[in-house]
Image (cartoon, rainbow, N blue to C red):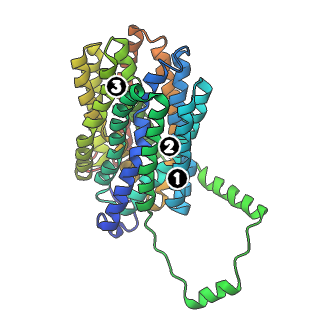
Amino acid sequence: MYKSEAHPEGFPDGGWRANLVLFGSFMGLIADFGIANSLGAIEAYVSTHQLKDVKQTNVSWVFSLHLGVMYFGGVFFGELFDRFGAKRPLIAGTIIMVVGLFLTAESRRLEHFILSFGILTAIGTSLAMSPLIGAISHWFLKKRGMACSIATIGGLVGASVFAVMLQKLYIDIGFKWAIRTMAFICLFCMIVSIIFVQERTSKIQNTDDEAIAFEQDPKPRPTPGSILKSCISFLRQALDFSILKEQRFVLLTLAVFLSEITSMTTLTYLSSYALNYGVAQRNAFLLITIVNVCGIPSRLATGILADKYGRFNVMIASSICTTIVIFAIWLPARGNIQVLFAFGVLFGISTSAVISLIPACTGQICSAENFGKVYGTMYFFLGFLTILGMYFSSLVINHGTKIDYRNFVLFEGALAFTNIIIWIWARYSSVGWKLCKF
């Protein structure tokens, strides 16, 4: 499991500095992943209010673009993290994310939501994602699965709070101030992450002679030509897709895509599904909270199990459980709120490993020094795939009739079943059929 690292014994895997980085990542992901995991609470409202006269397939572009742009930017922003560390990407991401949310609060038309939430807010979350996740890989190795699980619990906490909060604030203070309140919470969480999250690098101090020489021969000011050359060099490094020759990378990317699209499309349309079957609005929004809250303890448990038995092994087990839950509970549920609550609990448990173990699985096919680039490249392709996945989901839902939503459940089940096969194949590409910790 640790053969991708040249010096696996050099990772702290604990201590006050590593734990402070973990705390900062947890706080940042409350905002970063919390927004993405609470799309359903926003989609269910705007599709019945500001965009009530817009076709469902068109409304879905707002949220598919949000996820797509969030993932697409990873190929550039992962390289930024590897080159410049965590602070600058986090500061830029925070500013763009918060501005995007404030503009979302003012949106009234489809194109407004696409630009403010689907693109601008997503760029902010994409900028922050690589340092928030990548910094953990610098400090943890043997406990990386547990560390990633603890950090990404922040996303579940954020989504749980946002879903309940937005439902209440829509009624009490209206859509504008509900989204603004969400923006202020995200700003606070991101400030905490900026303070504590940092990369682990060895810095060499200059001697006095070097300092004097530097003063006598200062570095020349950058010219427009040198800046252009630097940008071109950066883009070449960021867009280096030679890793596509690695079968392990391609299969892992497909497995991650199927895991994420199953989880995200369910969270995005679960409330709308429930409302279509006559479930009260309060209970429909509560379903999202149940999924996220139930994922909190199970996410920690899967992280511990992944470090003990193997990250890929746990993802295979998670995919099997998700498939069973969709076909055995969600499919026959229809409008039965008790069954839907049971589905929310079990789906939250079975998919809890989706986000948390992806960084740990990625770390098994690359070193920590290249993590940002590999992780970002993976999410670059996931951006395109996610936009297509969300769009096809909206096509399945079509006019939003009960038959359409039943077809949507079957579609989700088919994705989950295919995911089992791809995860097994991805594991086979690394260790074959060996029954080992991987």
**Whole-percent x, y for residue 328 in the image:** 24, 20
Which residue is at the front of the view, 83 or 180?
A: 180
Residue positioned 40% across, 35% down in the render:
37
Left or right of residue 381, residue 111 in this image: right
Dot 1 or dot 2, earlier in sequence: 1
Q: Secondary structure at mark 2?
A: helix
Dot 2 or dot 3, earlier in sequence: 3
- Mark nearest the camera among 2 and 3 is 3
Which disc number belongs to residue 285? 3
Q: Looking at the picture, does residue 9 appear above or below residue 97?
A: below
Q: Looking at the picture, does residue 437 appear above or below residue 60?
A: below
What's the residue type where badge 3 is placed?
Answer: Phe
Residue 244 visible at all = no
User: Disc 2 designates what residue?
Assistant: 379
Residue 397 visible at all = yes
> Alpha carbon of mark 1 to alpha carbon of mark 3: how far?
34 Å
> Alpha carbon of mark 1 to alpha carbon of mark 2: how far?
9 Å
**Whole-percent x, y for residue 145 in the image:** 31, 51
Left or right of residue 244, residue 154 in this image: left
User: Disc 1 designates what residue?
Assistant: 78
Q: Looking at the picture, does residue 191 appear above or below residue 416?
A: below
Q: Secondary structure at mark 1?
A: helix
**Whole-percent x, y for residue 267 in the image:** 38, 28
Q: Looking at the picture, does residue 117 appear above or below residue 86?
A: above
Where is residue 415, by image quadrant? top left
Mark 1 and mark 3 residues within 8 Å of each other at the beta carbon: no
Mark 1 and mark 2 residues within 8 Å of each other at the beta carbon: yes
What's the residue type where badge 2 is placed?
Answer: Tyr
Left or right of residue 64, residue 262 in this image: left
Q: Secondary structure at mark 3?
A: helix
